Amino acid sequence: MLVKLRKFAFAVKNSTTILLPEWHRTLRAHQLSERMMPRDVSTRWNSTYDMLNFAVKYRPPINAMTAACDLDLRKYELVSAEWRIAGELRDVLKIFKDTTLFFSCDTPNLATVIPAMDHIDKVLATCSNSPNQFSPAIRAALAISKKALNKYYNKTDHSEVYRIAMGMLF
C-alpha cells in the first residue's frame, strides 16, 4: 500500500504534460484544493504520516485517477482493505508526528522526554491490544514499535543522568 502511494505520487509529479494536469482537473472536479501529494522521504521522519494523511483525505481523486484506464495508473489502485490499513497506519503514526512537533517547538530536555515516552508507550500498548480497532498487520507493527521503545527504556534505567533529571522533575 505504501509503495503504491509513493509510486502514484512520483508518477503524478513527474508527468508534467499528462498526469499532473489531469491531477489538477480531478481535484477541481472533486472541489478540493489543488495540492501535490507529499512525498514519503526516508530522511524526513514524518513524511510517511504526511503522505498517508493527505492520501486518506484525497482518496476520491486518487481513486478516480487510478481507476482511469487511459492514465496507466491502475497498478497503483488501492482496494478497500488497503485504504483501511492506510487510515489505521495514519492514526498510529499521528502520535509520533505530534511528539516530533512538540519537541521541535521547545528545547527538549530529559525531564520532558521520559513522560513523552511514557505517553507513546501507553498509546502503543492500548492500540496493540485493540483487535476491533486495528488490523493484525498494524497490531504486529505496534508490538514491534513497543519492543523498540522498551529498548530505550532499558537504557534510561541504567542512566545516572536520567535519575537526576527525573529527581529534579518531582
Image (tube, helix red, strand yellow):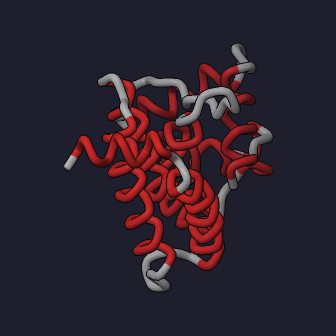
Q: Which residue is drawn at 57% across and 44% down?
A: 62
Residue farthest along the top direction in this orientation: 16
Q: Position of residue 77 (x, y in %)?
A: 69, 53
Q: Is residue 73 above or below residue 24?
A: below
Front residue of this view, candidates 81 and 75? 81
Front residue of this view, candidates 26 and 158? 158
Relative to residue 105, is residue 41 drawn left or right? right
Front residue of this view, candidates 142 and 91? 142
Q: In this view, does 9 lie above or below 82?
A: above
Q: Which residue is drawn at 80% across and 40% down?
A: 72
Residue farthest along the left direction in this orientation: 170
Does the rendering let one see residue 16? yes
Task: Place residue 143 in its image quadrant.
Answer: bottom right
Q: Where is residue 95 in the image (x, y as percent from the top left)?
A: 40, 51
Does the rendering let one see residue 80? no
- Quarter of the image with the N terminus is bottom right
Q: Where is residue 108 in the image (x, y as percent from the top left)?
A: 36, 29
Q: Residue at x 53, y 46 (%)?
A: 52
Relative to residue 98, is residue 49 drawn left or right? right
Q: Position of residue 23 (x, y in %)?
A: 57, 29
